[in-house]
C-alpha cells in the first residue's frame, strides 16, 4: 500500500499556502505565528505515540476494507461525514462559545480541508498512481 505523506512531499508549499490562507482569514497573521504553530505540531509529533500519517493510514485501511462491498463514492461520503462530526465535536470542546465562534471554525476547517485535498491531489498527479487502493 502506498502511503501519501503530505509532510514528505509538500512541506514548503503547504507552509506557503497555509500562511496565505491564514493571512486572508486573519490579516494580523504573521509568518512567525505559523512557525510557532508548526513547532508546536512538530513537538506533538515527537511526543505522540501514533503519528498523524499512521492514524490516517489506519482510517484508509478501514476504508479499503469497505471497498469489497461498497462503492468508493459512498465510502468517501461516510469519511467526510465522520470528519465533519468529529471536527464539530472538536470545535465544541475547544470553544467557550461555539455559537459565536461557529463561522470562524467552519471557515478554518474548510480552508484546512481544501489545502489538504489539493496537496493530496498534487501528490497523486506527481506520482501518477492510478491504483484502486490508497
Image (cartoon, helix red, strand yellow):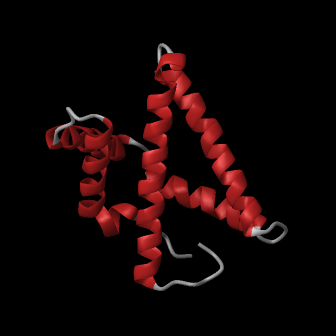
Q: Which residue is drawn at 47% across and 86% down?
A: 128
Residue 94: % across, % down: 47, 23
Res 50 visible: no
- Answer above or below: position of 130 versus 28: below
Query: In the image, what residue occupies the spot 16% across and 39% down?
Result: 30
Residue 71: quarter of image: bottom right
Q: Which image quarter: residue 38?
A: top left
Viewport quadrant of the C terminus: bottom right
Residue 31, image x, y percentages: 16, 43
Q: In which quarter of the image is the N terminus?
A: bottom right
Q: Is residue 73 depicted above or below 49 in this figure?
A: below
Residue closest to the far right: 69
Q: Residue at x 43, y 48 (%)?
A: 112
Along the line of sight, the residue nearer the viewer: 107 or 47? 107
Along the line of sight, which residue is nearer the eye, 98 or 51? 98
Residue 130 drawn at (x, y percent): 57, 84
Q: In this view, does 101 lie to the left or right of 92?
A: left
Amino acid at each position: 500500500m502506498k502511503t501519501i505523506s503530505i509532510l514528505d512531499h509538500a512541506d514548503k508549499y503547504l507552509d506557503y499556502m497555509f500562511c496565505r490562507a491564514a493571512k486572508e482569514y486573519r490579516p494580523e497573521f504573521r509568518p512567525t505565528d505559523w512557525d510557532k504553530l508548526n513547532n508546536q505540531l512538530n513537538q506533538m509529533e515527537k511526543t505522540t505515540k501514533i503519528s498523524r500519517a499512521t492514524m490516517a493510514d489506519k482510517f484508509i485501511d478501514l476504508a479499503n476494507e469497505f471497498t469489497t462491498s461498497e462503492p468508493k463514492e459512498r465510502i468517501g461520503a461516510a469519511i467526510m461525514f465522520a470528519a465533519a462530526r468529529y471536527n464539530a465535536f472538536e470545535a465544541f470542546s475547544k470553544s467557550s462559545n461555539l455559537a459565536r465562534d461557529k463561522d470562524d471554525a467552519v471557515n478554518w476547517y474548510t480552508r484546512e480541508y481544501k489545502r489538504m485535498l489539493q496537496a493530496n491531489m498534487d501528490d497523486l498527479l506527481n506520482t501518477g498512481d492510478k491504483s484502486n487502493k490508497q
